[in-house]
Amino acid sequence: MIVLFIEKVMKEVLLYKLTWPEIQDYLRENDVILFPTGSTEQHGKHIAEDNDAFTALEVAKRVAEKTGVLVAPVMPFGYSPHHMHFPGTITLPFEVLVQVYKEVCKSLMKHGFNKIVIMNGHGGNSNAISETLRKLKEETGMTVYSLMVFPGGWVPEITNQTIETRGGHADEMETSVGLYLGQRILFEKGEKGVQPESYSELRRKYRGKITVASDFHETTISGSIGDPTYATYEKGKKIMEAGIEEIVKFIEDLKKIS
Ligand SMILES: [Zn+2]
């Protein structure tokens, strides 16, 4: 019993920590793989720059441990030109990112991973991922799935109840999630996102109705949009546990289809 228990606890879910015969064994019974993607970009004055990649990988690992599926290496670079005015951000051109996503998925498909789920931690990647899914469908006939690892879309009722301020980046929700997942957070450095004086009257007036290509430094001085000072570990725990539970249900359903 003890040996069985240790084996269960120590079951490796990271593809890149397995050997090829182990992967071959996995593929005899399962063809699902999670592909976490994020970004390396500023996250206000208080959250480490790897947060979107970190979150994607951490959520993927937790989902994998509950469902027995594997996790591909996390893609640490995303589409983040709008963060480039803050030190440390690394971005890729849109077309390069689509190409990388496509080639990773095609490599996995070649080995027999027929059900790929791109687990995205950065909203700025969404268009590149949509383009990837479309191109892969046309070029290979395969359906690839994608989902956001932040729980807003999975448990809106809990996110809405729990979060007191509406934000969008390095805010109350993202900071709470980071506190729960064990991210490096300098909590006392967190600042509410304040618009610089240069923010245009026209955009203020028509906010939510018009769209422009916007850089973060034009919108916020600290790099946050929203107010991270409301964040707590408990909020992060509540919304992430609920979000992960929903993602686990999706993966279990995905495993069942042929
Ligand atoms: Zn983020």
Image (cartoon, rainbow, N blue to C red):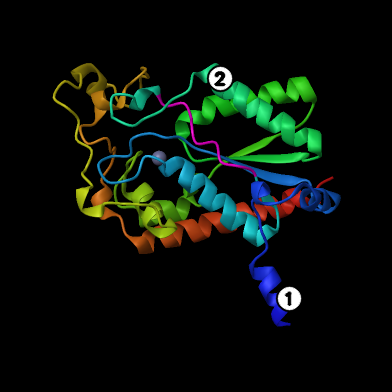
Q: Give me the residue at 65% from left, 51% from top.
A: 17
Location of the C terminus by quadrant is top right
Q: Is 101 displayed left or right of 148 in the figure?
A: right
Give x and y (percent) for residue 130.
Answer: 60, 27
Work out whether 148 lies above or below 14: above
Is residue 77 part of the magenta span, yes or no? Answer: yes
Residue at image location 27% in from the left, 35% down from the top: 223
Q: Residue at x 26, y 20 (%)?
A: 203
Percent x, y of residue 257:
81, 47
Mark carried by residue 4: 1
User: Tag 1: Cα neighbours inside 10 Å, few (<14), some, or many (≥20)?
Assistant: few
Magenta part of the protein: which range? 72-80
Q: Quadrant of residue 137?
A: top right
Find residue 239 and report its horizontal and vertical position in percent.
Answer: 45, 57
Q: Amino acid at mark 1?
A: Leu
The magenta stretch spans residue 184: no
Choose the circle earlier in sequence order: 2 or 1. 1
Left or right: 54 in relation to 142:
left
Is 21 above or below relative to 67?
Answer: above
- Neighbour tally class for label 2: few under 14, some 14-19, many 20 plus, Cα within 10 Å: few
Query: The residue tagged with tag 1: helix, strand or loop?
Result: helix
Q: Is the C-beta of the residue carrying label 2 under 8 Å from the nearest atom of ligand 1?
A: no
Side of 203 relative to 146 (left or right): left
Dot 2 corresponds to which residue? Answer: 96
Residue 246 seen anywhere in this rendered image of the structure = no
Kind of residue at badge 2? Val
Q: Which mark is residue 125?
A: none
